[in-house]
Amino acid sequence: MTDRPAPLRGVRILLGITGGVAAYKAPELVRALGKEGALISVLMTKHAQRFVTADALRAVTRGLVLTDLFEPAALTDGPWFPDTPKSSLAYAHIGMAREADLLLVAPATANLLAKLAHGIADDLLTTALLATRAPLLIAPAMNTAMWEHPAVQENVATLRARGVRFIGPESGELADGEYGMGRMAMLELIVSACAEVRGSGSSPAGAAGAAAPLRGRSIVVTAGGTEEAIDPVRVITNRSSGKMGFAIAEEARALGARVTLVTARTTATAPAGIATIEGMTVGAMRDAVLAAMVDADALVMAAAVSDFAPAAAAKTKLARTEKGLTLELSATPDILSDVRKKFPKKLLVGFALETEDATEGVARGREKLKRKGLDFIAVNNPLREGSEFGSDRNDVTLLAKEGADVPLGLRPKREIAREILLRVAAMLNGNR
Ligand code: C5P
């Protein structure tokens, strides 16, 4: 953990800060990015300065902190970043925009999103945002009603379609004391997202993957539904397709991890090129997972594991009888709890499949998180439209030991996987 490479080493980040309350977190964000090796210069809007001062930002970065298109420092010839020479580009909005590897706006207000979606450039930050060809990452933060306003959602869709990446917002307690969607993403997630944007960027340095947040990590993922024999022919199983676990395994590999996949019965096609061990029954899966965890940093337990198994499987096929059949089932071992007992410090993520309504489902998820000693649990409901068994999408609410629930909404399983794994990376890399 200690000698891992700083994922943003030498990456020039131009940070835009707009006038949301979350702007007060900007100095902490600059420090977190700097800790990962980034070189940061800052552009602040007029309203951002109501929440945090330019001097506070100057105290935490070696880069420039500018606020106005026409302030003297914005009209000189740089240097625009700590490692760049003075340039012939005598305007900050052009020089910074050209020399940055990544533009990050955090927090981004509804106003900033609207201006950017429509190409308005009426201050230093919005002008720089139009003058850049570097990737753009946005961390919105605003009141729930504002975030949900159709105009804001349309602007977000427009920007996404143009290739702008978003991180957050999250749900939780907002500045006005209300609970809802709109809080700026956790700083460590913003840092991981910067690393990810660099890792998947088009520049050769980025593609080389210095930024993959799970590089050097080993992750065990389980997928599918277990089978327990009733007799040599019949089994107790469930409707899990394995798609969620497969998406997690693929995304973990894309983020740089070494992945071991432990699969039970699946109906989807397994990802190619990932080390896979079969663990059909709860017992077999338990043994495979415990063995694989010896060398692993984290476990994501997406498999649907049977909670009950026939007390004893019949040796021969049970014959049909007129009076029917009563099966005696006993509880299976809880794999996650056993892994926690054996590896008290490793990072464990569980899934809680709940068919109750959302509030009850989340409450049960919280109880499981605690009882099984997990770091995160992803609560999902296959009875909800769009996230049925076998679907390519899922509707998940993430719960951590600390902090508010994070409803991720109905999204492709691969995106859900990324949200989970970026949190795993943030935790493993000590950013929380
Ligand atoms: O208690 P419940 O089965 O709902 O918990 C779900 C989570 O626990 C899932 O991550 C599942 O993979 C895991 N699990 C387990 N061992 C079991 C049953 C479930 O690890 N016997």
Image (cartoon, rainbow, N blue to C red):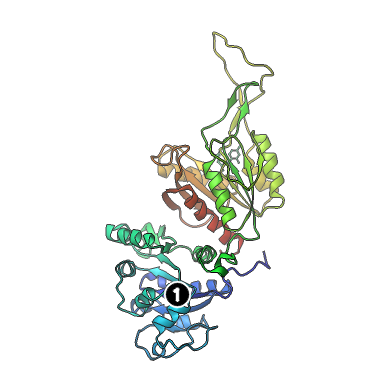
Quarter of image, res 281: top right
Instruction: Give the quadrant of the C terminus.
Output: bottom right
Q: Nearer the viewer, residue 61 or 262?
A: 262
Q: Amino acid at mark 1?
A: Leu
Residue 370 in the image: x percent, y percent?
A: 56, 48
Residue bearing mark 1 = 15
Residue 36 horizontal side relative to residue 52, left or right: right
Number of dots carrying numbers:
1
Q: Position of residue 113 (x, y in %)?
A: 33, 67
Q: Residue at x 45, y 68 (%)?
A: 135
Q: Position of residue 160 (x, y in %)?
A: 38, 60
Instruction: Measuring from the top left, give residue 33's x and y in whole percent.
Output: 53, 72
In the rendered image, the residue lying farthest to the top is 322
For the residue labelled by badge 1, is the local secondary structure a helix, a strand or a loop? Answer: strand
Judge from the rendering whether residue 137 lies leftward or rightward of residue 253; answer left or right. left
Q: Which quadrant of the figure contains the N terminus?
A: bottom right
Task: Tell me: residue 300, above or below residue 150.
Answer: above
